[in-house]
Amino acid sequence: MTSTTSSTRRSFSFPLELQIEPRTDSPRWLAPLVSFVAVLLALVMGAVVLALVGGNPFRAYAHIAGAAFGSLGVFSDTLVKATPLIFTGTACAVAFKMKLWNIGAEGQFFMGALGASIVILAGVVSEDASKVVTLAVMAIAGALFGAAWGFIPGILKARLGVNEIITTLMLNYIAFALVNYFIFGVWSEGGFQMTRTFQRAAWFPRLSDLADQFPIMRGLTTHAGFIFAVVVAIIAWYILFRSLWGYEIRLIGDNPRAAKYAGIKITRNTVLVLMLSGRIAGLGGMSEISGVIHRLQGSISPGYGFTGIIIAWLAKLNPLLVIPVSILFGGLILAGREIQPAGVPRLIQGIILFMLIASEVFLRYRVRLVRRTA
Amino acid sequence: MDNLVEMKGITKRFPGVIANEDVDFELRRGEIHALLGENGAGKSTLMTVLAGLYRPEAGTVFVRGNPASFNSPRDAIDLGIGMIHQHFTLIQSQTVTENILLGLDEPRFLMRLSHYDKQMEHIGDQFGLQVTPDAKIWQLSVGEQQRVEILKMLYRGVEVLIMDEPTSVLAPQEIDELFKTLRSMIAEGKSIVFISHKLHEVMSIADRITILRQGKVTAAGIEPAATSKAELANLMVGRKVFFDLEVGASEPGEVVLELQGVSAENDRRLPALRGVDLKVRSGEIVGVAGVAGNGQSELGEIITGLRKCTSGHILINGNEITNRSARTSIDFGVAHIPEDRTHVGTAPNLSITDNLIMKKYRDPPLAKRASLDRDAAQDMAQGLKDEYTILAPSIETPTRMLSGGNLQRVILAREISSEPTLLIAMQPTRGLDVGAIEGVQRLLLEQREAGSAILLVSEELEEILILADRIVVIYEGEIVADGVEPDPAKIGLLMTGGSGEPDAERVA
Amino acid sequence: MDPIIILHAGLATGTVLLFATLGEIFAERSGVMNLGLEGMMLIGAMAAFSVTVATGNGWLGIAAAMLAGGALSMLHGVVTIHFQADQVVSGLALTFLGVGLALVLGEGLSKAGTISLLPKLTIPVLSQIPVIGPIFFTNQSVVVYVGYVLVPFSWFYITRTRPGMHLRAVGENPSAADAMGVNVYRQRYAYVLVGGLLAGLSGATISLAVSPGWFSELTTGGLGWIAVGLVIFSAWNPWRAAFGAYAFGALRRTILDIQGPQLLLGLRNPFFFNPYYGFFLQMLPFVFVIIVLIIGSREAVRKRMGAPAALGLPYVRGERGL
């Protein structure tokens, strides 16, 4: 039987009629346009909510724009905020491409931070080791810990078919508790929720280090982690879109049965891809430690792992697009800290994601107004 | 007016295709009226309009003389018109009674199954359609499930029963049972529309025949006695279709595929293959005839590595590939045209290029160490697109936008261009229009000339008769005949567990 | 660490989980997965608390919570049922939305003062039954009793009534149900709404009965996600859901209590002497969920007791046949 597609009629009693039918083409300009309009509408709705709660949306948005991109100084801060987002956004994009719903980027981020911190706090590298060695070992540890945190849900799904949404999520909370244990119970500094500050060798170089040669760089907090993040994103893009493995990942994500028919091992890739995703998020944690916080403490992330999900979706699961989107969201988070009420950035992120997925219907269906036939 | 149902000037459009164009159709009380046409001619569509599923762009439906317009299948059922679809609308995990009661307003709240179970038994007896009311659907055979579908309609008091390709899943014996049932329903005062593309069935059961071709009526309400199969075929297809493919004699070479005592289970852990022995040689087409569900799907799956067998050996050119992966089969030169081209054979959101490289991407020239050479891939895709005339805007078009025929061309291009040692073709022409069917069959023959060994599994006995050098019959997981003579009557019997001696008055 | 006390207290927390889980069971039985439980629960908790503070009436608070949860669930419904968006991502978006909205609208609520809790009841005759009486029927909040009734009612509705049969049909084979005249879209909307209402109720239970007050995100603290796990564990069966929910509630109470005494089973209590081990206890509920899922998945494979066949798949009219 040839497949019959339906043109269901949703008629209102106008002389005109709304006709909805599946698309038979997909012009290249459509997807970006739809995304753009969706985000715009989301911002409008966010403004409405803000107004309802008694805020001034125009001032709030103008403030965000200024506080995030208004000057070199704040732009530099935006890039700092964007750095962990690029990591988590890329991590989520990689996993989602294979339809593995990694909601655990936050926990993997924490584990990566933990791994990097253990290197310093447990003296794996000596205090007078060089910056290069210290940072390299920290990065390896961060990647390892993150990969392990991705391995667990991966193997559970591959071997036992356990839903990865919940396992990755549960592992978030487990990671938080684990990190807290180490902070409070093992390496606490004076009973506060943080450890001692790490030695200079564990710090990423930042632009302000060059202030002596380039006075313009004074006070610029952008650190090497940003470059690191961009490089990782590019490598991830290359893996997904130019390598053989990436082809397999995309095929599995689109149609696992076809992938099986083509001889691709799905269980193996489930584990490997979740480990890769965890590794990338873990590097994000390490980067945040080395670039910004310089110690291990309880609050190292205002939800970078979750925002990463939205970024990945907005970037259409393309790591290259993750970079600019992360910068935008970085600005939002940075400026959003000063907006009351405190939940506004989160709310706007939620509305954006919602509008994005709702708008995807326009990529699948064509909506037309036609004259109603008698 | 004797017409129970009249459809005048029905036009129905879907995106990109006109399914019915200005079609007239009438059904008299107490008759079996066949709607004949090939796949895609618009027969099912026309009846879905009558059954209330879709609204036509133009035209009117009259029931018992009054114009009727349906907003849903319920409206049609209220007027006594019900349709039984080709793919059953049954809930596998629920019982017969629950399925018959599906969608009704009664019982109001409590199910009271024991009460209704008795009702179903009663109605089953009344029409000669025995069922076990508390059995779950997944426990029933296909023929029994069809009975439930019919009872569903009868329970709702329909007078006009529309059956869409009802015999496509039945064995010849079950088909006889069905025809008996249909005739007894006519005796009880019902009227039946019988949609089919099978000439011989239509000739044997219908009182009148209406033929659709490409959405238009080419003959309305003719009586079987007044025509012939050849004439009907002509009206169906519009040209002398009978099989003008040049099929030369084959010269089979070495044994390529050998199955020794292979057994396997299906998804329900029931035995699907029992001790199958089979050999296919290079340059030969072996056709597997059988009613759907007798183990053919599993047969294809174990050879291509998609299913494990529980015992036995599979050898390709002497190499043991038993229970090794799909990749192993592919590496040994096994190509697979799957039954389900949308859900298994292609990745719908990936481009044509990505779909074409699915088998060869691991090897040079497509693979350059660990990465994919995009230019090489695109060159290959463009070449294949032209060679196999795949109609699409570009090679970057996602395959979900292709028609069935073009999708099959993509799969064929991919599988055949790899110059396979062994080609497993599972229902390769299902759902395609005549032009596409011929193209596929031609390609299969070419591959045979080129020396491939081909295992052809098809539900269309005619196709096997044309193409196969050797015919094998599968029944309940066993090969009941190997190298049987191309006699439809004999084969039909074997397909249903008979002994192979032709009876009088079998499949025409 | 009295087992009676633990079980008694566990019922209250368990009821929170129970409502959310039952609601999601209804939604998923109809074929729609709604992962936004955490968001719906949080906004329910916030609505309940703020309305109760404003009006002094806990019942109005419950009504407000259910409305809030229901409204949010309808967003998910429109996007997944009509727009056929991916149900997983939509559920996640709903979580962000619900949590964000609750935080924004609930700003300042934590300073709003105390409220009177919902009434607690002791059932006369039943509370005298040894062992069971003091746990189940003595001094429990009203909502707990609502939970007791909801479980058998849900089971009965789903398995023994006609609307329940239609619900199951829609989740197993929507195109078959559609062909027989069942309005698939309407059914799915209805049960997604039920899920939202119950999630709102669940939130109200937290802020009005279990841990009264508003603690922004900590109010729900991951309970919504645990409920999602419980749905799978329960194999979409209300009785198993109840078992899982109550067991979980008891576990949480145990974790709290276990840190108290100096002696644990006659031995030195490590959790008392090193309070930092408490973090490992914090992990327990989440580890528990993972273990529960592992068990649930293996059983499902064994007994073929899987999810509703059409779960997670949008239904599109016209995709019949192929």
Image (spheres, coloured by chain):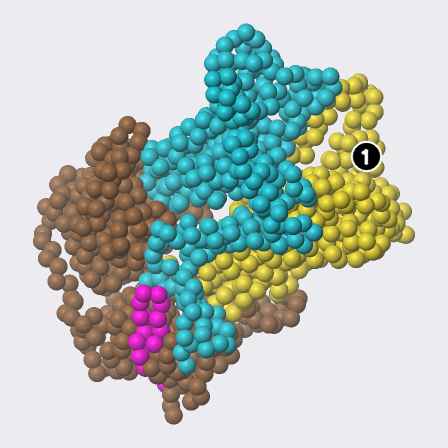
Chain colours: A cyan, B brown, C yellow
On the picture, is C111 further left or further right than A351?
A: right
Q: Is residue B373 left or right of residue C201?
A: left
The answer to whether residue A154 is visible is: no
Amino acid type at image mark 1: Pro
Residue C235 location, x and y as percent? Answer: 60, 47
Say which quarter of the image contains residue B326: top left
Is A19 covered by the magenta stretch? Answer: no
x and y, in percent, of residue A55 in the image: 67, 49
Within 10 Å of the Cα at label 1, are there few (<14), some (14-19), or many (20+) other Cα atoms? few
In this orientation, which residue lies closer to the viewer: C236 or B159?
C236
Stretch of the chain drawn in magenta? B11-34
Q: Quadrant of the C terminus of chain B?
A: bottom left
Task: Please check the rendered image and state whether residue B31 is part of the magenta-colored stretch, yes or no.
Answer: yes
Task: Check the picture and name the quadrant holding the N terminus of chain B.
Answer: bottom left
Residue B216, image x, y percentages: 27, 76
Question: What is the x, y in percent for residue B333?
Answer: 23, 38
Q: Chain of mark 1?
A: C
Q: Which residue is mark 1?
A: C3
